[in-house]
């Protein structure tokens, strides 16, 4: 029995985000404090824009907490063998959950603003404007804490061909505070217009504008994170790069099956099945694919063109329990990278 230990490899495809985790926790604390101030101030001063901003900030406090919790779980469960391809998608799930919360808040902002537009109430502008300004400063501080990781976290590859890979969990946290900053600006504009131009309806109108803006960001983030969670990455540039390697470097070889999905920030797993009439080994295929550093885990199957084809039919089996195939088993060579199956 050979020793498989030298051929085993780690399934931790994400380097972790300690700085992002720390800054997200800081943003949670700052946001929660300001949330209380704005909600209390909005109710006390009858400002729909200020109240909307406060409730919006409350959702951000919760969503930032979800993002921070996702970092903690991903780190603590990184060595848990139940996760076949690591724990990175916990962070993506955190981003998706935050996006859903962002959408809920947009709906609440819209309902409350329309209600206030129909049934206006007196607003204490002199007290509301300073609170909104402080809220904006708090949001800008949180955005500054999260911006470095949002713009620079992770790493690009020489063969990335322009497609960048962001930390979607951190991006969700960043979008939450940016959205909050935008609604704070709208609140300040609305309150200023009401005070100096006597346009009282501007306050709920800005609440509606803010709701639409936040909803758009929520939908964008839901699409991006949902795509990763559903492994919808077969249109990623790396897929065509793999096809190009086979076409250019492996004469007499064709792809019979190809699956590519993300397992980390800018990191992909790949299952590649080939048929060839040439003497070809999985090691040769993997050596040609190694130029694409974003491929972190590669499995290669090679079938000989002159051997009977095997087609597995899911859900069907022979009386002895074996899968039904179109022919008897043919000789196949199989390799899972970067080491043997683990």
Image (spheres, grey):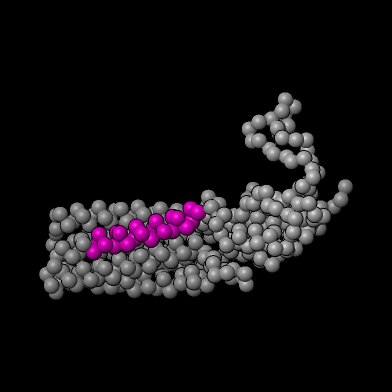
In the rendered structure, the answer to whether residue 136 lies left or right of residue 6 reads left
Question: In front: 329, or 120?
Answer: 329
Q: What is the count of numbered marks?
A: 0
Taking the spot 36% from the left edge, 70% from the top edge, the residue there is 139
Taking the spot 25% from the left edge, 67% from the top edge, the residue there is 187
Question: In front: 296, or 186?
Answer: 296
Query: Can the viewer see residue 78?
Result: no
Going by the picture, which residue comes out furthest to the right? 1
- Quadrant hosting residue 200: bottom left
How far across and down, in percent of the image, does residue 4 sit?
A: 81, 52
Going by the picture, which residue comes out furthest to the top? 319
The answer to whether residue 320 is above or below residue 251 is above
Whether 222 is among the magenta residues is yes
In the rendered structure, the answer to whether residue 61 lies left or right of residue 186 reads right
How far across and down, in percent of the image, does residue 2 sit?
A: 86, 50
The magenta segment is 206-227
How far across and down, in percent of the image, does residue 79 sit?
A: 66, 55
Whether 293 is among the magenta residues is no
How far across and down, in percent of the image, does residue 69 sit?
A: 50, 57
- Quadrant hosting residue 219: bottom left
In the rendered structure, the answer to whether residue 78 lies left or right of residue 174 reads right
Question: In front: 182, or 29?
Answer: 182
The answer to whether residue 143 is above or below residue 260 is below
Taking the spot 70% from the left edge, 63% from the top edge, the residue there is 248
Taking the spot 69% from the left edge, 59% from the top edge, the residue there is 246
The answer to whether residue 224 is above or below residue 138 is above
Query: Can the viewer see residue 154?
Result: yes
Magenta: main secondary structure:
helix
């Amino acid at each position: 029995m050979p020793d498989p230990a030298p051929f085993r490899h780690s399934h931790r495809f994400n380097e972790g985000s300690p700085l992002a985790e720390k800054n997200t926790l800081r943003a949670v604390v700052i946001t929660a404090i300001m949330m209380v101030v704005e909600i209390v101030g909005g109710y006390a001063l009858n400002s729909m824009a200020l109240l909307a901003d406060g409730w919006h900030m409350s959702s951000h406090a919760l969503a930032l907490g979800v993002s921070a919790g996702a970092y903690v779980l991903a780190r603590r469960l990184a060595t848990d063998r139940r996760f076949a391809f690591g724990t990175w998608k916990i962070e993506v799930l955190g981003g998706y959950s935050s996006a859903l919360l962002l959408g809920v808040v947009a709906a609440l902002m819209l309902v409350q603003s329309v209600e206030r537009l129909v049934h206006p109430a007196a607003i204490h502008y002199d007290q509301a404007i300073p609170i909104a300004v402080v809220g904006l400063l708090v949001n800008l501080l949180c955005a500054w804490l999260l911006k470095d990781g949002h713009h620079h976290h992770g790493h690009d590859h020489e063969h990335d061909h322009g497609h960048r890979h962001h930390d979607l969990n951190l991006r969700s946290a960043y979008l939450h505070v940016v959205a909050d900053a935008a609604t704070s600006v709208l609140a300040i504009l609305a309150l200023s217009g009401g005070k100096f131009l006597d346009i009282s309806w501007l306050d709920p109108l800005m609440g509606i504008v803010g709701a639409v803006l936040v909803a758009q960001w929520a939908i964008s983030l839901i699409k991006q994170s949902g795509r990763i969670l559903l492994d919808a990455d077969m249109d990623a540039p790396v897929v065509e790069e793999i096809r190009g390697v086979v076409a250019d470097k492996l004469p007499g070889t064709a792809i019979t099956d190809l699956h590519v999905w993300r397992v980390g920030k800018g990191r992909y797993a790949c299952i590649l099945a080939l048929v060839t009439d040439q003497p070809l080994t999985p090691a040769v295929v993997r050596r040609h694919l190694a130029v694409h550093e974003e491929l972190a885990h590669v499995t290669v199957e090679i079938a000989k063109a002159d051997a009977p084809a095997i087609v597995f039919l899911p859900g069907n089996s022979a009386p002895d329990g074996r899968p039904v195939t179109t022919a008897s088993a043919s000789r196949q060579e199989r390799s899972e990278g970067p080491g043997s199956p683990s």
